């Protein structure tokens, strides 16, 4: 099968011809249609997330169809369209799994990090962590929902129904979550890269009541803020932007160091929390909610051979919304 693999962090992905994987017990073999490109993929490639399994097939917003079922798999059928997210498996036995917090599982495995992902024509996945995808979405449109959407949704739940919410970094997750927040009746304030007029216009087109540079003060006191950009200095800025009792949610898996800040920025019951990974419950809830809103995704597509271009375009903010790698153009629907 054709694949793009990471052999060494800090180096581009390389084309390779690999044997087709085989579904083991509890697994499914998928024909990959497309795979979304996520900033977490950048963190793996750039070495900001340490110790990936190498060589590695990256990609963790996988849309594909079931080719084969491993022993013991139930609830899925040959030919069914499914999605595979970042959380590729959990032990089901540790204290976190027992408490319904499998996103914190002590023995979790992650797609495109410890398990080969979707930048290839075939992949295997834990059948328990494959999502049935809502009808009405094309493969290309649904792919970004599988990480950008799910992590954004989990972060949104931590905002506790904020009336005024700020998004620091307006990329794939924020462009989806802006629609969720507006559906819930919230005002959205978009903080974009300084000088990114195109991004500001994009945010306003999605109904944000204000869009400006991330180094600007908030125009009004916010009830909550979500920091999507992996930029530590944005955290104190967001704390200064939220009103007393407000909450700042850090939604990324990696962030540069957060600089020190005075206690007064946190005082008056402001809080700072992080979001880690996702749970299957998050996926089921969000994939049921998205078509009811309905959430639409803005997508830029790349062929499999151009994964490195997609990653670099993401790194430099060259597109609005999300990027999706098309693995099988004929299968995408």
Image: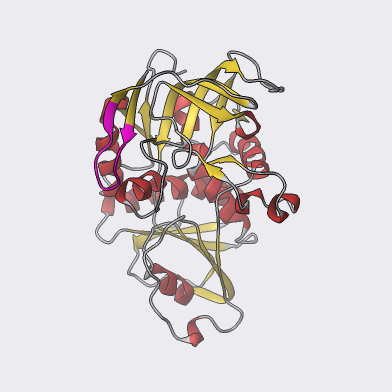
Q: Quadrant of residue 76?
A: top right
Nearer-the-camera pick, 326 or 297: 326
Q: Quadrant of residue 236?
A: bottom left
Direction right: furthest residue: 98
Return the residue nearer the eye: 321 or 294: 321
- The residue at the point 36 percent across, 64 percent down is 256
- Residue 135 can be seen, yes or no: no
Q: Residue at x 68, y 43 (%)?
A: 281
Q: Which quarter of the figure is the N terminus placed in? A: top left
Choose top left, top right, bottom left or bottom right for residue 322.
top left
Q: Position of residue 313 (x, y in %)?
A: 26, 42
Above-or-below relation of 327 to 228: above
Q: Is residue 114 left or right of residue 300?
A: right
Where does the image place residue 115, in percent across and percent down from the top left? 48, 36
Q: Is residue 14 left or right of residue 244?
A: left
Magenta stretch, main secondary structure, is: loop
Question: Magenta part of the protein: which range?
Answer: 5-15
Q: Position of residue 254 (x, y in %)?
A: 42, 57
């Amino acid at each position: 099968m054709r694949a793009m693999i990471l052999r060494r962090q800090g180096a581009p992905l390389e084309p390779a011809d690999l044997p087709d994987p085989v579904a083991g017990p509890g697994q499914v073999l998928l024909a990959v249609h497309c795979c979304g490109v996520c900033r977490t993929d950048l963190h793996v490639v750039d070495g900001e997330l340490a110790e990936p399994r190498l060589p590695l097939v990256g990609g963790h917003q996988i849309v594909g169809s079931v080719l084969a079922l491993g022993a013991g798999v139930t609830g899925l059928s040959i030919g069914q369209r499914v999605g595979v997210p970042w959380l590729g498996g959990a032990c089901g036995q540790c204290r976190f799994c027992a408490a319904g917090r499998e996103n914190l599982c002590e023995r979790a495995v992650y797609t495109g990090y410890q398990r080969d992902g979707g930048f290839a024509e075939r992949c295997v996945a834990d059948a328990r962590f494959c999502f049935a995808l809502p009808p009405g979405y094309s493969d290309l449109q649904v792919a970004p929902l599988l990480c950008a959407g799910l992590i954004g949704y989990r972060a949104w739940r931590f905002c506790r129904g904020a009336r005024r919410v700020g998004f620091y970094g307006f990329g794939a997750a924020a462009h989806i979550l802006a629609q969720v927040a507006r559906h819930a009746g919230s005002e959205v304030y978009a903080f974009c890269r300084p000088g990114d007029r195109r991004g500001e216009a994009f945010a306003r087109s999605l109904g944000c009541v204000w869009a400006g540079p991330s180094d600007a003060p908030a125009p009004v006191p916010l009830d909550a803020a979500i920091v999507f950009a992996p930029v530590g200095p944005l955290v104190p800025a967001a704390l200064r932007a939220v009103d007393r009792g407000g909450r700042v949610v850090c939604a990324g898996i990696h962030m540069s160091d957060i600089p020190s800040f005075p206690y007064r920025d946190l005082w008056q019951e402001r809080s700072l929390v992080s979001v880690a990974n996702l749970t299957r419950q998050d996926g089921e809830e969000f994939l049921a909610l998205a078509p009811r809103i309905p959430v639409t995704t803005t997508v830029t597509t790349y062929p499999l051979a151009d994964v490195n271009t997609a990653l670099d375009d993401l790194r430099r903010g060259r597109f609005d919304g999300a990027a999706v790698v098309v693995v099988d153009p004929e299968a995408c629907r």
